[in-house]
């Protein structure tokens, strides 16, 4: 399931496509002009935009450039022109893929899934991680522990999310600095220690009596469910 924005002015294309994509389990919003498409793409932050190039108010290529200037949202262009120059121009302008009209909903859905699989980040199409009573939802960036919400800072969330993606494995501080802090060299282990202790406190535990976060002295840290089953 993905949250899609379909920018298409032609009702004879838009209506059946909307229905077919919804039947395939996507949440689909539609816009019929470039300007409403631009506004919706920025306000609603869809997972992917399907963009028709022939729009009434503005050339779709122009909208593609405007969108690309302000957003990394994946974009699939629907074009009526099956010529190489056009396709190269569209891809150069930042489209992730294209389809030549007419196309079926099945073809579009396959392209959507392929583009989302390539992904732009871990939140893309990524189901919640569950470790014991911890549930970490990358999309909404919300964490619950035994059903109760846990308020985390963005860094604490990223740290927990990274560990929860590798339950039962010891993750080194070096790896955490590189992956969570984006510090490839020379970061201080202390930085990780401090955030781990904050995270512990929010999860209602401490280093002496760990439940989820286990320090492996001299190596790193391991997240696992109480009882040892990830
Ligand atoms: Ca059109």
Image (tube, rainbow, N blue to C red):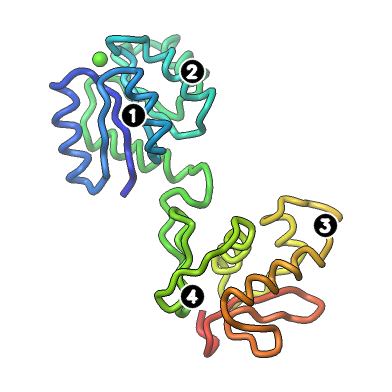
User: Along the polypeptide, which appears first: circle 1 or circle 3?
Assistant: 1
Task: Residue at 62%, 62% (x, y): give it.
Answer: 156
Front in this rendered view, residue 115 or 67: 67
Q: Kindly identify which numbered label has been placed on residue 35.
A: none
Reading the image, the residue beneath label 2 is: 65
Q: Marks 2 and 4, how far apart in space?
A: 42 Å
Q: Kindly identify which numbered label has been placed on residue 187.
A: 3
Image location of residue 226, percent across then percent down: 53, 86
Q: Nearer the viewer, mark 1 or mark 3?
A: 3
Q: Kindly identify which numbered label has been placed on residue 50.
A: 1
Q: Quadrant of residue 152?
A: bottom right
Task: Residue at 51%, 84% (x, y): give it.
Answer: 229
Residue 104 left/right relative to 160: left
Depicted 106 relative to depicted 197: above or below:
above
| SS at circle 1 | strand
Callout 3 touching callout 4 (CB < 8 Å):
no
Reading the image, the residue beneath label 4 is: 131
Q: Marks 2 and 1, how far apart in space?
A: 14 Å
User: Along the polypeptide, which appears first: circle 3 or circle 4?
Assistant: 4
Q: Marks 1 and 3, how far apart in space?
A: 41 Å
Depicted 165 relative to depicted 200: above or below:
above
Callout 2 touching callout 4 (CB < 8 Å):
no
| SS at circle 4 | strand
**Mark 3 beta carbon near ligand 1 (under 8 Å):** no
User: Along the polypeptide, which appears first: circle 4 or circle 1?
Assistant: 1
| SS at circle 2 | helix
Callout 4 touching callout 1 (CB < 8 Å):
no
- Binning the other alpha carbons within 10 Å of mark 3 as few (below 14), some (14 to 19) or many (20 upward) gives some
């Amino acid at each position: 399931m993905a949250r899609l924005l379909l920018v298409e002015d032609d009702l004879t294309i838009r209506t059946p496509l909307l229905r077919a994509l919804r039947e395939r389990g996507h949440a689909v919003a539609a816009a019929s002009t470039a300007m409403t498409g631009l506004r919706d793409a920025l306000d609603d932050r869809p997972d992917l935009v399907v963009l028709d190039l022939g729009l009434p108010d503005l050339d779709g290529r122009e909208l593609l450039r405007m969108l690309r200037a302000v957003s990394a949202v994946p974009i699939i262009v629907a074009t009526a022109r099956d010529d190489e120059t056009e396709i190269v121009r569209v891809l150069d302008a930042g489209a992730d893929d294209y389809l030549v009209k007419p196309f079926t909903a099945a073809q579009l859905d396959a392209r959507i899934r392929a583009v989302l699989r390539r992904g732009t980040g871990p939140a893309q199409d990524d189901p919640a991680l569950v470790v014991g009573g911890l549930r970490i939802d990358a999309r909404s960036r919300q964490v619950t522990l035994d059903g109760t919400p846990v308020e985390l800072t963005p860094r604490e969330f990223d740290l927990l999310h990274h560990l929860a993606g590798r339950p039962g494995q010891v993750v080194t501080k070096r790896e955490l600095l590189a992956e969570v802090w984006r510090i490839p060299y020379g970061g201080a282990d202390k930085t990780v220690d401090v955030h781990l202790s904050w995270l512990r406190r929010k999860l209602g535990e401490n280093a002496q009596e760990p439940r989820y976060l286990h320090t492996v002295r001299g190596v790193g840290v391991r997240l696992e469910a109480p009882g040892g089953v990830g």
